[in-house]
Amino acid sequence: MAGLVSVLGAFAALLPSAALAQRVSFPLPESPAGQGRPVAPQRPSPSLPAVPPLQRPSIAVAPPVDPGRYFRYRLGPGDRLSMSVFMVEGYAAEVEVLSDGTINLPRLGSVPVWGLTMDEARRRITAGYDQYLRRPLVYLDLITPRPVRVTLVGEVQKPGFYSLTQAPSSANLQAAGPAASGTQIQSAGWPTLVDAVQRAGGITALADLSNVVLQRPSAAPGGALVEYRFDYLRVLMEGSSSVNPLLYDGDMILVSKADGVQPNDVLIRTAASNFAPDTIGVTVVGEVKAPGLQRVRSNSPLAAAVMAAGDVNPLRANPRDIRLLRLESDGTVSARTIVFNPAAPLDSLANPALHNGDVVVVPRNGWTRGNDFLAQAVAPLGPLLNAASLFRILSGN
């Protein structure tokens, strides 16, 4: 026996130390919980890729399908979660994803979940509890999703940033101006593209519903933006089917501007749809019976605003010299002289379609201007003339 041990020792001395270590090293079995347990490898927390300066993200144009069909919800700050472990007490918790993208769980402490799907977050939590429990079965539920933060640009009444919640809510779509009743839009459930356009006050009179673009950030860090295009004008005009996609955090909606003047039937159908605001505000001043801010339907003709103001005064107005003032998108004010004809077709030269914020000036005719000038000139002499008349009456002359 001693001879066999000496032979094995001599043979081992001839082997390299690294090879000997490789031959005699074995995986150690898992030790019981709390007794020299191995540290489970932690998955790196998701982080945004570094974007070089002055470099815009690439955009991938997707076919016009439902953009939410293959979308997986990813967690972010503001999500409320419910976590529990099957048949284990003391581990249940209701937590909210903090601004740094982490949640605080019993025994585990801070766990990063920003950018993970529900399945990925559940597997990460399971891997953490696997250090303390034997084959833990983790349940993870989304109690309250965070508000969907979207951006609306282009031809909408109020472009900008919006937070859309899943809870039932209402939005008043009346245009700018004094307090007046407008359309109350009730929305419930997950917000959609049409809900976002309505929250932004609806489309403008220059919007092109045949080219509505939805840009969505990539689910994977560093991926390209995905762009979807929708033709809602065909839906309104032909009754074809389309998709009203669900929106997700980070989406951007672009309503394009129409090229040139749109046909009358397009203006009428668009104004009657729920894409347009219920009313717009137009100020009518001058020789009308009820001057002031008037509320008319979107894309209404000039005649509608004039009639809402009580029609022109036939004795004082000059309907052949009506002026339409409009604030353009570049900050300039355009002025048009219109020969008013209430029977003219919509958006014709004599009856143009109105935009929100337009000002209609109905001037005086020549006879009225002359009478008003004489009245102003004679007004200072009125007391003297009245005194002379009273003197003649008293003197009997």
Image (cartoon, helix red, strand yellow):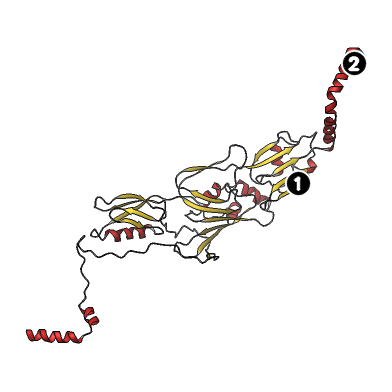
Q: Residue at x 61, y 46 (%)?
A: 272
Mark 1 and mark 2 residues within 8 Å of each other at the beta carbon = no
User: Image quadrant for the C terminus?
Assistant: top right
Which numbered circle lies on residue 382? none
Q: Nearer the viewer, residue 322 or 17?
A: 17
Q: Secondary structure at mark 2?
A: helix
Q: Residue furthest left?
A: 1
First-in-chain label (1 vs 2):
1
Residue pointed to by mark 2: 392
Could one spot residue 346 in this view of the protein? no
Residue type marked 2: Arg
Residue pointed to by mark 1: 350
Residue type marked 1: Ala
Q: Position of residue 112 (x, y in %)?
A: 37, 58
User: Image quadrant for the N terminus?
Assistant: bottom left
Q: Position of residue 108 (x, y in %)?
A: 29, 56
Tell me where residue 306 sits by quadrant: top right
Is residue 356 placed above or below 314 in the rendered structure? below
Q: Position of residue 302 (x, y in %)?
A: 71, 43
Q: Residue at x 42, y 62 (%)?
A: 47
Q: How many marks?
A: 2
Position of 203 compared to 141: left or right? right
Q: Residue furthest right?
A: 397
Is residue 194 placed above or below 53 in the rendered structure? above
State which mark lies toward you, 1 or 2: 2
Alpha carbon distance from label 1 to label 2: 55 Å
